[in-house]
Image: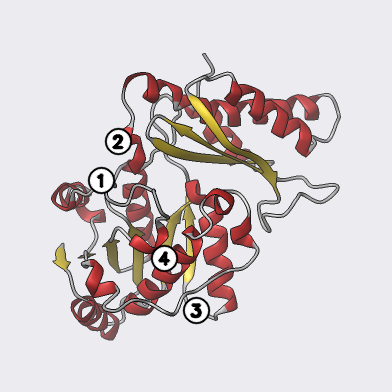
Amino acid sequence: MERTTTIAGVRVRVAEARSAGARIGLVPTMGALHAGHLSLVERCRDLADLVVVSIFVNPTQFGPGEDLDAYPRDLEGDEAALRALGPAAPDVVFAPAVDEVYPRDPVTTVSVRGLDQVLCGVSRPTHFDGVTTVVTKLLNIVQPDVAVFGRKDFQQLTILRRMVADLDVPVELVGGPIVREPDGVAMSSRNRYLEGVDRTAARALSRALRAAVAAARAARAAGEVPSSGVLRDAATVRLRAEPGARIDYVEVLDPDTLAPPPDGADRWLVAVAAFVGPARLIDNVVVGERADEDALLAATDDR
């Protein structure tokens, strides 16, 4: 595994591999790696011959007053965790400085209108333009055949899939499943902010999703079709029961379009966001996808 901090350096390495017929994979991250990130790297290794992991805390996706300065940074620790993957470790860590990625004030941005106006886009109105712009730059720099992103950031993955489709970017985007702590909390770099009662309160998000799944299964058992309102109410009641979590949103949407689910829907994205201590946390489940439901229930207790 080697580190490069320059665009020229990563392009040389990729070009050498591609000239030998290698399939190129990319896992974009902001560092502070946890087991969820590492699972994406392992998935990418299954899909590509040369794996690049980018580690870059992207300033353009942070809004005023957000945690850009406080965001955890530990490049040496991240590289140690990647090396510990053994045969699944990436070939290249691309860890550029801000002025390498943005050598001048950017006047060109990439925006996916509509999909960025719901869920996290409401309270973070500039966030997704920053995400889509930096991911476009990374895809142009590395030119991977496949890129792997986590499904915990479900809205982000949906937006990026629409972006590469609309712009004819020749890359396959793969979503990796949510990886959870033993108590059900979705792994996140921002979990490092949580201690004591805040860490305990963070369990409320996955428990809220569990309540929505239980409501859907109860409806099906009664011969009824689950409704968006029933799922939303079940999740909201459970999340409100935790005084240490301040709700940002509880939404039930079509998982393909992020629009209100149509009549007769058989799949629903239940997405939650809440402020817990110093952190803003997100989580989701696709109700109607049995594997997604089962993975959540297997990892989440409701005590």
| Circle on res. 169 | 3
Tell me the residue at 15%/65% (across/down): 3
Task: Tell me where residue 111 appears, x and y as whole percent.
Answer: 54, 71
Q: Disc 3 and disc 2: Cα gap in Å?
A: 35 Å
Task: Tell me where residue 272 appears, x and y as whole percent.
Answer: 57, 38
Q: Disc 1 and disc 3: Cα gap in Å?
A: 31 Å
**Mark 3: few/some/many CA within 10 Å (<14, 14-19, 20+):** some
Task: Tell me the amino acid under the disc marked 2.
Answer: Arg
Q: Which one is earlier in the sequence, the residue at label 1 or at label 4?
A: 1
Task: Tell me where residue 115 appears, x and y as whole percent.
Answer: 62, 61
Q: Disc 3 and disc 4: Cα gap in Å?
A: 12 Å
The image quadrant that residue 99 belongs to is bottom left
Mark 2 touching mark 1, by CB under 8 A?
yes
- Tell me the element at label 2: helix
Outermost residue toward the front?
Answer: 64
Q: Disc 2 and disc 4: Cα gap in Å?
A: 26 Å
Q: Disc 1 and disc 4: Cα gap in Å?
A: 23 Å
Task: Tell me the amino acid under the disc marked 1.
Answer: Pro
- Tell me the element at label 1: loop
The residue tagged 2 is: 192
Tell me the residue at 44%/71% (across/down): 133
Figure check: 12 above or below 145: below
Q: Which one is earlier in the sequence, the residue at label 2 or at label 4?
A: 4
Q: Which one is earlier in the sequence, the residue at label 3 or at label 2?
A: 3
**Mark 4: few/some/many CA within 10 Å (<14, 14-19, 20+):** many
The residue tagged 1 is: 72
